Amino acid sequence: MNFQEFISAAAQMALSGGDANESRLLDAEMTAESLVSSVFKRITLVINADPDKRALLRRTNTIALTSGVGTLPSTILMECLPGATITDPDDDQIAQDMSYVPNYFDYLEAAGYETRLGYWTVMANATTGNTIRYIRPNDIGVETKTGNVALTVVTVPTIPALPTDTLDAPQEFIDMATVALSNALRMKEAA
Amino acid sequence: MACNYHEILAAVALRTNALIGAKAGPLETTYNTRPLTAANFQSSIFPFSDYRTAILGAEEKLAQVIAKSNDEDQRAYLMAQTAVLANGAGLPSVSSGSLSILGPFGATLDGTDTTIVCTPQPVQVIRRRLATPSLWKIPVYWFAIVGNRIEHTRATVVRECPVYDYATRKTAFTANGNMLLADGLMEALICGGISMLVRDDEFVVQAATYVSYFNDTLNSFRPAKAA
């Protein structure tokens, strides 16, 4: 299903149960498009909350680090990070020693206290995108990694660049998102 | 359309005693002569060309009323399109062929693909769309009319418009071309033409009778609702 078809399906679904000629949702494509980002995120969180479904949206994101600091794609939600796995192509054994530390203060404390293990954290940054910070084992409290790491985590599907581009998401997600977008248009549920 | 102008001309001229032929036989011959010319006419009250003016005058009246009606089948005989209109353009008074626009516009169409009909939206929505182009990927075909201006979300649009051009009809009449409107309005054109043929006290009663017939037709078109 491409993006145009997705929007059209949700807009048409929103007209169900009434006279289309009388509906305030008759020309709702622009409103629908404005809700897509929120709907995608909400459905992603619904899937993330269900261990049986997480595999649907688990993606591996390559992140470039400079001195242990990089920018997280906007398709990765903070709420999904506790279930993430981080790997390093330079050290295929490192994943088992890396821990996600949500709080930046705890991250600094841990990195200085137990240097035999590695840590990573994410700090919100509205301007440049959320920042990931990464300290490997034996970095001794100083972020030194320069190069790529791979973060495998439940990820929000990307909104296509063109109406004719296919949605890069499993059908189960698309079906849930279509209904959710339709309901959002009808004010039946929050986007 | 198969009815040509000189069918109407013959009927109108007959009722003002203008056709040559003192007896039934010659009159029948003149009545069926095509094309009719000034040589077929004998009236000292109305010159030959005035019949054209009267009949086309009736056609103009009908066209005006039809253009302002919601009878889409009849409006189809008058329809043309404007030139392409950029966002914010003023609404034109002539079509793309420089013909005078008679009445309310019809559909608004995408200027690139005129098979796509645009739909109205509040101007505020359109302005929001235009102010934030990078936000939107799904194309929308929207327009708003504000005063005499059009705002829309396409590169260009065109608008359907009913037109009437006297010079074109005059040429068609002279060449005994087909009448512009539906064949079913032939009788109305005859009545309208006769109703305009009054000079001093000549044919006054007859004109009054035929104008009532003509008005019956004019009044049968339902005015369009205000947009």
Image (cartoon, rainbow, N blue to C red):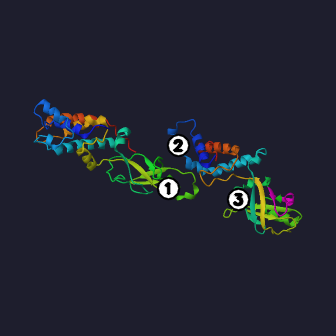
The answer to if B13 sits in the magenta stretch is no
Mark 2 belongs to which amino acid?
A: Leu
| Residue A62 sits in quarter | bottom right
**Cβ atoms at labels 1 and 2 below 8 Å apart:** no
Observer-side mark, 3 or 1, equals 3
Instruction: Answer yes or no: is residue B198 visible.
Output: no
Secondary structure type for disc 3: loop
Q: Position of residue B189 (x, y in %)?
A: 25, 38
Q: Chain of mark 2?
A: A
What residue is disc 1 on? B127
Q: Chain of mark 1?
A: B
What residue is disc 2 on? A26
Q: CA distance from mark 2 to mark 3?
A: 35 Å
Q: What crowding class fits label 1: few (fewer than 14 Cα within 10 Å), some (14-19), or many (20 or more)?
A: some
Say left or right for B122 vs B138.
left
Q: Are marks 1 and 2 on the same chain?
A: no
The answer to if A87 sits in the magenta stretch is yes
| Residue B182 sits in quarter | top left
Mark 3 belongs to which amino acid?
A: Pro
Q: CA distance from mark 3 to mark 1?
A: 31 Å
Q: Position of residue B51 (x, y in %)?
A: 18, 42
Q: Closer to the camera, B36 or B120?
A: B36
The magenta segment is: A85-98
Q: Position of residue B45 (x, y in %)?
A: 11, 42
What residue is disc 3 on? A73
Q: CA distance from mark 1 to mark 2?
A: 19 Å
In this rendering, is residue B67 above or below A86?
A: above
Residue at x 24%, y 47% (from the top left corner): B170
Instruction: Answer yes or no: is residue B7 visible.
Output: yes
In this rendering, is residue A117 above or below B113?
A: below
Q: Closer to the camera, B190 or B4?
A: B4
Say left or right for B113 vs B71.
right
